[in-house]
Image (cartoon, helix red, strand yellow):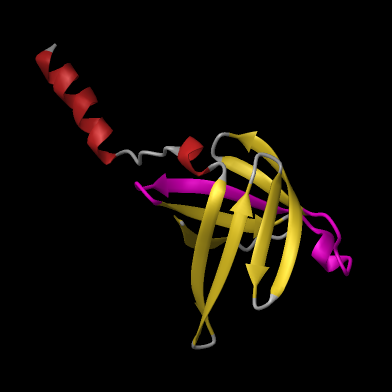
Amino acid sequence: MLLLVLTVSSCDTYTNKRNCSDFRTGSFVWEQESGGKLLKTRFERTEDLQIEYFENQIDTSRIEWINPCEWRVIPINPKTNADSRAYLFKILTTTEDSYTFEFKQSGRDQIYRGTAKKI
């Protein structure tokens, strides 16, 4: 019985803890490198909206929560048909002030990863 208790309690050490509710709303920044250039996106998220600030452009999207750690970002005023596709996001891990996530565009297979920091 003691072996069973030790085995089950040691499994908790290897699981990723996710406090997704800490990152459901707020102001965040995401930095990524592309073509040797560091790109920075700042965004603010409420329960149902996300406003992104990237290279002097502002985009507003609607948020649909699938569960506490997954949501869809749906553009409100897309300029093209390609821009109208939703993005699916999933929080993989969290720290005190950041979360690592993966996302993909609806209808596409390629998955991207990033880390957003709360500001």
| Residue depicted at 17% across the width and 18% down the height | 5
| Residue depicted at 50% across the width and 73% down the height | 32
61 drawn magenta: no
Q: Quadrant of the N terminus?
A: top left
Examine the rendered structure and indicate whether residue 83 appears above or below residue 24.
below
The residue at the far left in this view is 2
Examine the rendered structure and indicate whether residue 29 appears above or below residue 118.
below
Q: What is the total number of numbered labels drawn onto the structure image?
A: 0
Residue 65 on image: x %, y % = 66, 37
Residue 85 on image: x %, y % = 79, 58
93 drawn magenta: yes
Magenta-colored span: 75-97
Residue 41 on image: x %, y % = 58, 68
Please tell me which residue lies in front, 55 or 6. Answer: 55
| Residue depicted at 41% across the width and 47% down the height | 93
| Residue depicted at 66% across the width and 50% down the height | 88
